[in-house]
Image (spheres, grey):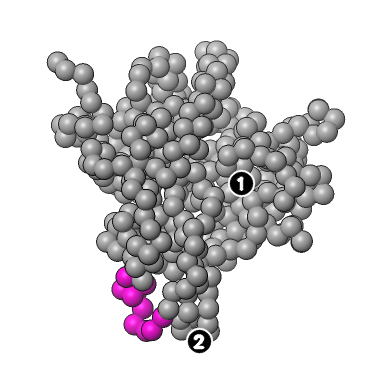
Amino acid sequence: MSALDKNNPPTDWVESLRLRYPCETELDRILTRKMRLRPGPGYSPVTLEALVAGTQSLIKSNLNDTFELTKARWLSGGASKLQMQFKLHWNKPGVGRTVTPMVLRMEPAESITETSRLREFQIIRALAGHVPVPTTYWVDATGDHLPYPAIIYEFAEGVTKPSAASSNVSGVGTAMPSSLRQSLGTQMVEHLARIHTFDWHKADLDAFDKPATETQALEWQLNRWERVWEEDVNEEVPLMRLAAAWLRENMPTSQRASLIHGDYRVGNFLFNEEDTKITAWLDWELSYIGDPHEDLAWVSKKIFGHLSEDGETFLIGGLIPRKEFFSTYEQLTGFTVNPKTLQYYDLFSNFKSAAICLASAPRVAGNGKTHQDVVVGWLAGISYMLLDELRKQLEEVL
């Protein structure tokens, strides 16, 4: 049998992965769409004029009124999505004629994290008023108006790091000065508590499947990332096979199902430098309904924090001591953080991260599917650090 060409995936192979790794309905649609479109053209630069035209078409389909779009420009930031900032002159409901700064957030031809703009749209809208999030307005879930699926939300003021701070890509290695730590650290844990205690049952989240058992949400996530690994990886890595087997054999039962951000960390919130108030939490594309321990394991990863000046205390996000973070979280939520479950999700986080960095990133960059091929290619270098940490974790649990 000839070698499998994952850049031209056979339909029967894609269908076999769908059957082998069942996941949430909307995520299955997104991953299947990715594979169907993979043999197609790579990323082709989209002009601002084309984005403006598509944005106008999307807005026009939702507004029965006159409007004008001005001052469109590219917006930097984000390792996986295209973003355009613009101003909308319109009759805003409850306000009247006004000018609103907005952002278009759109997929490239293929992303390092293939996700649903509809899910992102729904969860941001659901959490409005509970935690700081951008006001969302419209979604082009299937790319009917724009080249690729997109959402439009209101521009949020703020920065992701202090002006004088240094960091690498996407919040990795951000050094937070001591003057910001108390305020931002307190808000970070308070907002996570609000997200995890939010009553999602009353929200419009029909793009999210609701887990019916204590392990189903985790099973869906394991299936999702093992499927991504199979779809994207260039060569076999036995360590990943071992990790996947261990994760499946040792699934903890979840005591509650909460909204999970999926990428909760420094670099994914904006804040005002003047009053150190968090103005918006961003990048909700990996959200799902599951066990809060995933967010807790992710936010406390070493790569997203650093030691205090004395070299003794690890600061989550470079902001708040680990012990203080978890004790405050337990007080605010009434939940108990289970160390063994936290350890499980820490290992799971490395498995997921390795799938993204070692499988998806090289394939997307190599196939010329993204506008940020240099940044995406850079992420591949992180994968070997992740694999080494994964090896140490497996040695410990085995």
Q: Which residues are magenta?
A: 57-67
Q: Quadrant of residue 53?
A: bottom left
Is residue 176 rendered to the left or right of residue 23? Answer: right
Q: Earlier in the sequence, mark 2 or mark 1?
A: 2
Where, quadrant-wise, is the N terminus in this rendering?
top left
Q: Residue at x 58, y 49 (%)?
A: 268
| Rendered image: mark on residue 96 | 2
Q: Is residue 116 above or below residue 152?
A: above
Residue shown at 56% from the left, 30% from the top: 346
For label 2, count other residues whose C-alpha is less than 10 Å away and answer few (under 14), some (14-19) or many (20+). Answer: few
The x, y position of residue 375, in whole percent, is 50, 38
Q: Amino acid at mark 1?
A: Gly
Q: Residue at x 80, y 34 (%)?
A: 308
Q: In the image, is residue 67 above or below residue 377?
A: below
**Category of crowding for the residue at label 1, using alpha-carbon neighbours closer than 10 angstroms: few (below 14), some (14–19), many (at least 20):** many
- Could you tell me residue 139's position as x and y percent? 37, 63
At mark 2, the secondary structure is strand
Of 163 and 195, nearer the camera is 163
Q: Is residue 253 left or right of residue 396?
A: left
Q: Which residue is mark 1?
A: 267
Image x and y of residue 267, in percent: 61, 46
Residue 257 visible from this viewpoint: no
Give 380 or 189, whichever is nearer the viewer.
380
> Is residue 61 a member of the stretch shown in magenta?
yes
What percent of the width, then of the height, locates residue 112?
41, 39
Q: Nearer the viewer, residue 140 or 89?
A: 89
- Look at the numbered disc 1 and give the secondary structure of its residue: loop
Please give the label number shown on residue 59.
none
Asked if one can make out residue 270 in the rendered structure from this viewpoint, the answer is: yes
Question: Where on the picture, by quarter, is residue 322?
Answer: top right
Nearest the eye: 146 or 283: 146
